[in-house]
Amino acid sequence: MMDKKKFYINGEWVNPIKENNFNVINPSNEEVSAVISLGSSEDTNAAVKAAKKSFDTWKETSKDQRIKLLEKLLEIYNSRWDDMTNAITTELGCPKDWCSANQTASGAGHIEDFIKRLKEFNFEPGFDKGSVNHIIYEPIGVCGLITPWNWPINQIALKVIPALATGCTMILKPSEIAPLSAMLFAEMIHDSGFPAGVFNLVNGDGPGVGTDLSGHPDIEMISFTGSTRAGKLITKNAANTIKRVCLELGGKGGNIVFADSYPDAVRDGIRNVMSNSGQSCDAPTRMLVEKSIYERAIKEAADEANKIKVDLANKSGDHIGPVVSKTQYDKIQSLIKSGIEEGAKLIAGGPDKPKDLKKGYFIKPTIFADVKNSMRIAKEEIFGPVLSIMPFENEEEAIQITNDTEYGLGNYFQTEDKERAKRVAKKLRSGIVYVNHKPADSGTPFGGYRQSGNGREGGNWGLHEYLEVKTITEWK
């Protein structure tokens, strides 16, 4: 069991002012893997004070200086690739091979892309067209960054790197459920040579450190990824200080499979949902299938789900691991049971644990057919390996069902008709639309509509979130 009680504040690992121990559980075996301390208001204030003091000098550093430090960080990150994979595998239960290729790789990919964007970014674009005024971009100030457990280093990189790149200082509060990857990242920041106080890390929970950060008068911006419920609370708490709030929240993505979709569209949709044990906010957890291919699609979906293996995270091979915690496990089980009770047809998986995995938070890949969009399993974000399938008559109905949700993060559809693809993509109400399961390119903006949040992460859009725009008259 690891002792991880210290916080990283002002360039040093320091003991908490008030120790409040919290166990980090390995979801594969339900054993304590590490002990952290949940921070107090005094710990948060110390970190904010360090960040505020360092901002005056850090914001004056040149773009070249920041690029060199970020390049050093990338070098160190790559040298500790396996350490990062092991940390995420331990805290999240993510199978190590998949974790390395996806979770760990996402951190490196974001660092690389933000370095590229920073090199090209013009902080003084100059005179606006048709005006003698001068336009410049300046860092917003001290930022509070609150990251989730499901894609830990992905979200850390999407927030910390653009904040560093633009000249902001920050306090990172990772999820207390999965803090090990964040603490390893703090070691990398330290070894890269970033000045003391620029980056600080305080562990804690939402009601504690999260609330302290979102309401703190010396913090100019909060960037939060997590549940819609928590996003609403953060927005309310931040209102008194009029700080900028960037939110990436829940989702309930639709995946429209038209009759002319490519042959493996249904199977790819199943694999997409089940990866990361279903714990992705933009997972397409509602599959809408055109009626002419509906029966075939149900058979393919059940067959594909039954092929997916469930096993321990530290084992090699192609399989999914457990969900992250007992709380998540219980919530998912409740929703699976509600699907059965509401009359959806269970065609794969179900509430029973996988064979030979009696310990750990393991759930079988579960698929319901004949789902109505009014059912709980179609309305609520399950955040587990559970998929709902429902039929549709025509394009108009498919779009209507897909958009019939309070969320709007990611939607998907599959068709070989290029004109239909453009038409449907424009009508779907979400921040990103995936066509034929093609992934987004590096550096494209990620974020949601409606109760999936506001703001965008990634690329130049991610840099702009951390910048203020200043107009200067009489610039000569």
Image (cartoon, rainbow, N blue to C red):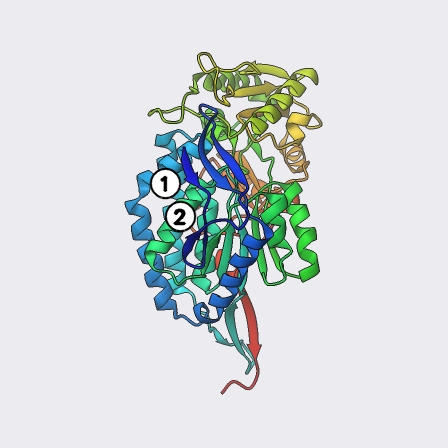
Q: Nearer the viewer, residue 416 or 367?
A: 367
**Amino acid tagged 1:** Met
Q: Name the quarter where the N terminus is drawn.
A: top left
Q: Nearer the viewer, residue 456 or 41?
A: 41
Q: Are marks 2 and 1 in contact (CB under 8 Å)?
A: yes
Q: Nearer the viewer, residue 383 or 30?
A: 30
User: Does 247 appear above or below 435?
Assistant: below
Residue lying at 51% horizontally and 70% vertically, measured from the top left: 137
Residue labelled with disc 1: 84
Which one is earlier in the sequence, the residue at label 2 or at label 1? 1
**10 Å crowding of disc 1: few (<14), some (14-19), many (20+):** many
Residue 382 lies, in percent from the top left, at 60, 29
SS label for mark 2: helix
Residue lying at 43% horizontally and 17% vertically, measured from the top left: 307
Residue 432 lies, in percent from the top left, at 54, 44
Residue labelled with disc 2: 185
Q: Nearer the viewer, residue 270 or 453?
A: 453
Regarding residue 458, the answer to whether it shows in the image is: no
Residue 223 lies, in percent from the top left, at 56, 53
CA distance for labels 2 and 1:
8 Å
Residue 338 lies, in percent from the top left, at 67, 20
**Amino acid tagged 2:** Phe
